Amino acid sequence: MSWVLFICIISAFVALLIILAAMSRHKKSATSEIRLVGSKAQVDSPLGPEGTVLVEGELWRARSADGTNIASHTTVQVVGLSGPLLLVER
């Protein structure tokens, strides 16, 4: 009976480690924000003037730099940061 308990505990621990490793892959690092300036992005939800964009496979909140509306599926360029938002322009 003790072997069954031991195997259950080890299995739960391994499952927890796998879940934590999978979740850590989706966190954005602070250095990636700096590298994003100058990158091309695809507008996911319309920027009016705020919405979301896909940059290098990651979804980011964004705002058009000049405050204009930008439609979905438009290609934009990241020109800067404003707190947690990317600033983009056509």
Image (cartoon, rainbow, N blue to C red):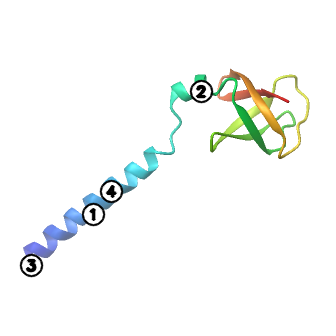
Identify which residue is drawn at 15% across, 71% down: 5
> Tag 4: Cα neighbours inside 10 Å, few (<14), some, or many (≥20)?
few
Asked which quadrant contains residue 50, the reply is top right
Q: Secondary structure at mark 1?
A: helix
Task: Please state the horizontal and vertical placement of residue 74, each as a whole percent of the image.
Answer: 84, 41
C-alpha span from label 3 to label 1 = 17 Å
Task: Specify which label sits upstream in the sequence, 3 or 1.
Answer: 3
Q: CA distance from mark 3 to mark 4?
A: 23 Å
Residue 49, percent across and down? 85, 33
Q: Amino acid at mark 4?
A: Leu
Question: In the rendering, at what x and y percent does residue 40 appear?
Answer: 73, 33
* Mark 2: amino acid: Glu
Residue 45 left/right relative to 36:
right
Tell which residue pokes out farthest to the bottom in this image. Answer: 1
Residue that carries the numbered disc 3 in the rendered image: 1
Task: Give the Cα separation between the discs numbered 2 and 3.
Answer: 52 Å
Left or right: where 9 falls relative to 37:
left
- At a point 91% along the width and 29% down the height, the residue shown is 68
Q: Which residue is mark 2?
A: 33
Q: Residue type at mark 3: give it.
A: Met
| Residue 12: numbered disc | 1
Q: How many marks?
A: 4
Q: Which numbered mark, 4 or 2, is in the foreground of this view?
A: 2
- The answer to which quarter of the image holds residue 81 is top right
Name the N-terminal-most of marks 4 and 2.
Answer: 4
Residue carrying label 4: 16
